[in-house]
Amino acid sequence: MKPKSNPIRMFTEYYYKWNYFPVTTSFHSHSQYEIYYFHSGRCDYLIGDRIIPLESGDLIIMNGMTRHCPKVHPSSEYVRTMFSFNPHLVQLFGPSLLACGPLRPFELLGNHHIRLDAESKTEFESILERINNVYYKNDVINRNRLLSAFFDLLMLIYEKCQVDMEVARANVTDRERHVQRMIAYIEEGYAEDIELDKMAADLHLNRFHLMKLFREVTGMTVFDYIYTRRVNQAKILFFHSDGHTVTDVCYKVGFKHLSHFSRVFKKQVGMTPDQYRKMMQVTPSMAYQ
């Protein structure tokens, strides 16, 4: 099924059972998490220096940062479902569901290949179908049905990754551990002023080493990450309530100047905060993109 246009959407990119055959493929990376499911055909998936020969029922989760692309055999069909999403989207689940750690497989495993057994394959495809059935319906009921199905999908992925996550916890590198601490530090204080010198001192790291390490592991500078985190929080605030003014949100998420907030927001989202807020008032159900 060819992806339909949906400018007010929940996932950054989404298509379901797409059989379009790409003329060319090239390595790419992005800051969103990605779920890729292979239905049928012949394809090798390349992630960094790994080559994964795919079989029907193969699932790949990715943190997006590592360059990846499919290598498709032209003599065969190529049917897949894929969607990417900003990790802060899960805030829409609320604190009780977030306590389960729905994104832990992405955080601990980064890029991970799962070969589903027959029972899990049937269950996974059923959830994908549920997601697709409500994805393009812009009303409150179907918004909540979509969130429910998406959470169910993440929990199934979590279940299938439990053993590998235990191994990963034991084998995490010092570089990754340092960056995890940096991200936790930013998460705690992104709405306040974050000074690199203080951050480095608090984390007992050299300032230059901190900046270099963060960029090497995440592909972003520290401040690019902070601005992205603030913009995503602004979108969530607009999503939850039309009572927030643009100025309110600007200060709540940590920007000091409205003009700076507007410029960064437009660069990342493609519209001004006020345009986004008005869109939310018209169609409040699915405007997280």
Image (cartoon, rainbow, N blue to C red):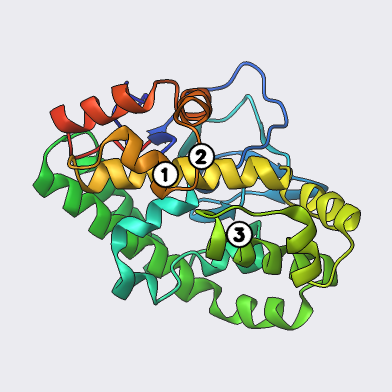
Is mark 2 in CB contact (under 8 Å) with mark 1? Answer: yes
The residue depicted at 41 percent of the width and 61 percent of the height is 121
Which residue is disc 3 drawn over? 186
Q: Amino acid at mark 3?
A: Ile
Q: Is residue 122 visible?
A: no
Q: Nearer the viewer, residue 191 or 271?
A: 191
In-image side of 91 versus 80 (left or right): left
Residue 218 x, y percent position in the rendering: 72, 50
User: Label 3 vs label 1: CA separation?
Assistant: 17 Å
Which residue is disc 2 drawn over? 256
Q: Nearer the viewer, residue 146 or 210?
A: 210
10 Å neighbourhood of mark 1: few (<14), some, or many (≥20)?
A: some
Q: Earlier in the sequence, mark 3 or mark 1?
A: 3
User: Label 2 vs label 3: CA separation?
Assistant: 17 Å
The residue depicted at 46 percent of the width and 66 percent of the height is 157
Q: Earlier in the sequence, mark 2 or mark 3?
A: 3
In this rendering, the answer to whether 273 lies above or below 133 is above
Task: Kindly indicate the quadrant of the structure image that contains residue 75.
Answer: top right
The residue depicted at 34 percent of the width and 54 percent of the height is 125
User: Label 2 vs label 1: CA separation?
Assistant: 6 Å
Residue 128 x, y percent position in the rendering: 33, 50
Q: Nearer the viewer, residue 217 or 81?
A: 217
Q: Is residue 277 visible?
A: yes
The residue depicted at 71 percent of the width and 48 percent of the height is 222
Which residue is disc 1 drawn over? 251
* 2 or 3: mark nearer the eye: 2
